[in-house]
Amino acid sequence: MAYVFLVLISLGVEVVIPLVIAIVCTMFYEITRINQRARKDRQLVSMFVLKLWFLGSTIFLVTSHSIREPLVATFPWLLRYYANFGMFAFGLPMIGIVGFVLSLRKGMYRYQFIQFTWIVMTLLFTVIQGGIQIKNMMRGMIWFLLPVSCVVNNDIWAYAFGKMFGRTRLLALSPKKTLEGFLGAFLFTMAWSFWFAGFLGYFPELYCPKVDFHSPMHCEKDPLFVQRALVLPSFIQKLTGNYLTTIQCSKAQQHALVLAAFASLLAPFGGFFASGLKRAFKLKDFGDLIPGHGGITDRMDCQGMMGVFTYVYLMSYVYSDAKCPSLHDLSSCALRLSDEGRIRLMRLLNESLSKGF
């Protein structure tokens, strides 16, 4: 399965985006069916239609927003539709709310509102997180692949160390999780992330941002991925007898350590949350799509939290100086300026260019 995933990754975002959407849809199905009552659902066909409407419209809005810049760069005529994106974002959910109100039936109010709340919360935990994962890969496939691999490796090492050295139970919600597995996985995930980030930095297809959907992945290598000599702390130098004083390291590898720390220490709480939900409804697994491993949600319970943290971390510390509007938005705004405004803008640009030379 891991090899299939790597092959899909190598085919680029055009393949991975539909894969993410398929995973999101499966998770939505697995979670929303937990609270369903078959007899009542047979009487409320409208709830099934509304569920599909909210899922489809939310995926459309979130995905189109996540891939906006490369999509407009590929198809410039879409810019006029994106100008009205806010109305779409309001109108599509509004249609669903109106449909829900019209579908209310006497004697079913409580059940219908419970289902509606369940749908909205599930969309928040699945589709929104899926959209954030897509935005991460638009920055470069490395920011999708690296966090995902950290969670997978942490899960593997936690199981291995728990089997070999596990003695102390970590949480009552997950009796099989041990403190020894938790700590062992932390150390090995940190080491993995450092090496893997350096390895991925050799492939332009993985570190280049997605500019459009028709050009090959090629860009000038960002200094973020260039390895330089890094002086090690004095206590590490002493531990090695001053044999090791510097290492070759890129800034991306340093950021990878932060992602690995989150994947090891906090992302597992997404799994604990899912375990609590299953216990609340007396379930062993969310589904049975993967024989012996439950459903897709059982495998992805930590990935959503990891993807959100990666996005927030990148925007706050890695690309914090890249918060300006896109070139399309800037040019559109500039063309809407008055003649006097355009003249002032040209004067400012000329002054900036003259200072640069």
Image: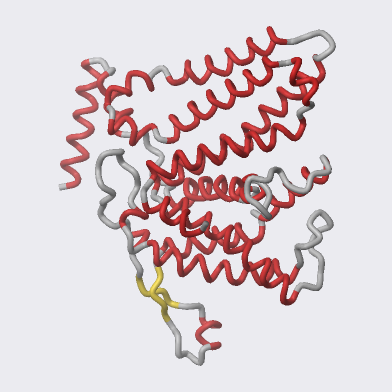
Measured from the top left, where is residue 264 in percent x and y? Answer: 63, 61
Q: Residue furthest bottom?
A: 241
Q: Quadrant of residue 228?
A: bottom left
Relative to residue 56, is residue 220 drawn left or right? left
Q: Residue at x 30, y 29 (%)?
A: 328
Q: Quadrant of residue 34?
A: top right
Q: How is the image coloured?
A: secondary structure
Q: Residue at x 58, y 58 (%)?
A: 151
Measured from the top left, where is residue 334 in percent x and y? Answer: 27, 24
Q: Residue at x 59, y 49 (%)?
A: 303
Q: Using the image, determine if residue 323 lies above or below residue 229.
A: above
Measured from the top left, where is residue 179 in percent x and y? Answer: 75, 68
Measured from the top left, where is residue 349 in percent x and y? Answer: 21, 34
Q: Using the image, determine if residue 325 lies above or below residue 142.
A: above
Q: Residue at x 47, y 90 (%)?
A: 242
Depth check, front residue: 175 or 316: 175
Depth check, front residue: 79 or 175: 175
Relative to residue 43, is residue 234 drawn left or right? left
Q: Using the image, determine if residue 221 lies above or below residue 234.
A: above
